[in-house]
Image: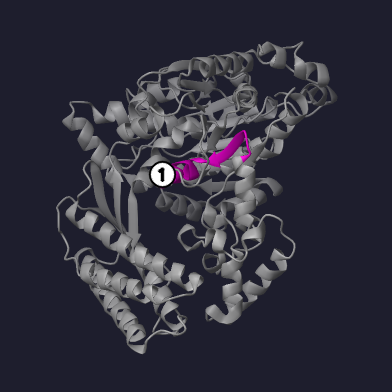
Amino acid sequence: MDMREIFGKDGLISKRLLAYEERPEQVEMATAVQSVIKEGMHLIVEAGTGTGKSLAYLVPFILWAVEEKKRVIVSTNTKTLQHQLLDKDIPLLREYLPVKFSSCLALGTQNYLCLRRLNQTLSGGFLLNPIDQRELTRVLNWERRTKTGIRSELEREKRIGIWDRICRESDLCLGKDCPYQEKCYYQRFRKRLFGANLIVVNHHLFFANLATNGMLLPRYQAVVFDEAHSIEEVATSYFGVRLSNFQLNYLLNSIHNPRTGAGLANRLGKVKDDERERLQTVTTETRAAADLFFEEILNRFGPEPRTIRVKEKNTFTNRFREPLRRLSSALRDIEKGIDDKEKAIEISASADRCLGFSQGIEAFLNQGLEGYVYWIDIEAKRRRTLVAINMAPIDIADELRKRVLDKIHPIIFTSATLSIAHRFDFLRQRLGLNECKELILSSSFNYRNQVQVYIPSNGPDPRFNPNLYTEFVAAETGKILRITKGRAFVLFTSYVMMKRVYSLLKDGLAEITLLKQGDASREELLAKFKEEVNSTLFGVATFWQGVDVPGEALQCVILTKLPFDLPNDPVTEARIESLREKGANPFLDYQLPQAIMTFKQGFGRLIRNRDDYGLVAILDTRVRRKSYGSKFLGSLPRCRITNRLDDIREFFQSIPRSSESDLTEASKTRF
């Protein structure tokens, strides 16, 4: 079917929907997707905001999946886009497309309530404090109503701290032997999943599925990576390993907690006393060895929050290799004499986790994974210090090519921010995309009329005098917010600077509600921002992308600093070294393109529909003074640029307000 028959001005949708507006860019993208499906090729598409890219890839893939009996994965980075697909786009296509298709949202297994573990907890399998008891009562009341058993449904109002005890864990599942098999929420979900033509996942689940050799998702024949600009970051985390003292302490407490008397050792039932005592003793020995290991790290580097890259092998003594192996062996010996399948699988899972932790520590100390970077994170928590050891691949291109690109055809990579200087060289290099087609589509929005860009004439260089720069940012932000009356995002590259600017401004802007990331959840902050007129939200990385606030609630985005990755970040540092060894220029070939892509994401928070107007303030004057600054500005749509605050005042005075004609025009439905 020609895509014009669907999206054209005389197409299927326009005939059934009176208020419909054709978008040539959408037709072009849908046609390109249809073409690569037939050819079995990969495609990169940069489609500006307002193109309607989600429907442009959904339509040809749905038609193909139904006709050819195929399955398509659509992978996103944010819940915002998932909600758009599931609540808006897919329901519309069910109504307007001439085929019937099935779709499903896939979530990780730990998102589902496990009825067996819930009843195990109820029957006294765990010692519960009063807070846990209250939470358990809330879970039971919810379980009587729920049809899905999904955690997010339960936690809309408040987080449930005991969820880890009652959720589904893959290595604790009894499968067909489970007495709750017929009622299992996860199994109901799996039936829908395997019957779906279209499965929506997030990038984390997609790569978790790769990491588990395809255990989480059914086989699929095509993939769409929407919000593809974030793939490298997510894939790096899933191809890597992170182990912490908190994780190990949780594991050991689940086996035997000497303080509370809880744990697997005290729930085994009829086992030999010497076996139980041996398990408790070895658990205690392992805990002591672990404490010495993590104390050695803190003694060397101190308890202050920091990140330390580890470049040499065997920097620390592996004090608990043997205790962990003895603990795993003790669990295996007990498992042999257990007839109860529930207890047996819990013992087996604990043994496997001990062995896995031991192997992870060994790999970190020996630095046995070639092409990986190794580092330690030290973080201050409420009651104690977290120490985490980390390993991650420096380059994911080869792994991604072998495990995804060479096996699945077609794959679509799309986002509003994928190109640098109208080329995809950076993305192709980072992801290993050797052979693929390319398409760049501009937005249909009129940025020259809708957006005013403000760049101050002079400002200190943030590299040489960070304290002076922070004061400059606070002063400029205050001036701008008084003009816009709030209605702004102020985006930072570090928590430290965000907190300092917030502190400098909070008492001088009494008429504006200031919201700061960290004071509430992202969802709560966004809800309050949308509800309260003249509010301003201060945020870091997570607010640079995936946030959609159309309309008058958001009419200003302030980019406080060019978003270069910190060169002392272990992964960034290792990538810089790797590029330098290959004779490349790390700044031009990695740091600058990465920063430009994030910069474009931050800019893109402002204009979300054709009726939006507003200001983007770029306070880092390096975009004017440095030779590379033109690359940042050249990555943006054509807008009016000024260095005068008076121009901002005039711009906001000229913003058209809603009228009857505006409402009529805005009522057109743009797919």
The quadrant of the picture occupied by the N terminus is top right
Q: Nearer the viewer, residue 643 or 23?
A: 23
Q: Residues within 10 Å of mark 1 (few under 14, many from 20)?
A: few
Marker count (numbered): 1
Looking at the picture, how far across and down is residue 298, in whole percent? Answer: 25, 67
| Direction bottom: furthest residue | 273
Q: Which residue is mark 1?
A: 213
Q: Is residue 126 above or below residue 160?
A: below
Position of residue 407 measured from the top left corner of the image (x, y, whole percent): 41, 29
Is residue 161 among what the camera can see?
no
Instruction: Judge whether 577 appears above or below 570 on screen.
Output: above
- Nearer to us in this view, 149 or 627: 149
Residue in the image at 50% along x and 52% along y = 502
Query: Quick check: 590 left or right of 209?
Result: left
Decide: is 225 above or below 190: above
Image position of 669 (left or right of 351): right
